[in-house]
Image (tube, grey):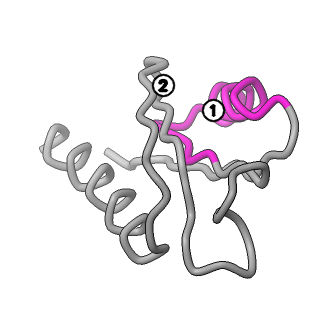
Amino acid sequence: KQILVGFALETNNELANANRKLQKKNLDFIVLNSLNDLGAGFETDTNKITIIDKYNNRQDFQSKSKIEVAKDIVSRIAGLVEKRL
């Protein structure tokens, strides 16, 4: 019943590279961060992510505080835990 989550920080071919990591590591979902997005990455208080699951469903999030991004990720994990109980 474990949930596997990965993170991909990408600069080129972001979606393709994240999908490759998702499949290679057999993850439930991967959180994609692109260093090409304004207000994302390091040395900023905000981030913009995309979550891709193993069924190739994709959810794009708007730029928001890193605390709010963390809440989105934890919420996604909690939803998977609920489904598996």
Seen at 60% across and 49% down, the residue is 6
The answer to whether the residue labelled 1 contacts the one labelled 2, judged by CB atoms less than 8 Å apart, is yes
The residue most toward the top is 55
Q: For the C terminus, give its image quadrant.
A: top left
The residue most toward the front is 38
To which residue does mark 1 refer?
22
Task: Answer few, some or many: residues within 10 Å of disc 1's Cα (few below 14, many 20 plus, some between 14 and 19).
Answer: many
Per the rendered image, the range of residues in magenta is 13-32
| Closer to us: 50 or 28 | 50
Tell me the CA gap for discs 1 and 2.
7 Å
| Closer to us: 37 or 6 | 37
**For residue 83, above or below residue 41:** above
Residue type marked 2: Lys
Q: What element does badge 1 sit on?
A: helix
| Closer to us: 39 or 18 | 39
Q: For the N terminus, give its image quadrant.
A: top left
x, y (%) of residue 20? 74, 26
Q: Is residue 84 left or right of residue 54?
A: left
Q: What element does badge 2 sit on?
A: loop
To which residue does mark 2 refer?
54
Seen at 22% across and 49% down, the residue is 81
- Tally the marks: 2
Residue type marked 1: Leu
Asked whether 15 falls inside the magenta stretch, the response is yes
Q: Is residue 6 left or right of residue 17?
A: left
| Closer to us: 16 or 78 | 16
Circle nearer the N terminus (1, 2): 1
Seen at 30% across and 49% down, the residue is 76
Q: Is residue 76 left or right of residue 46?
A: left
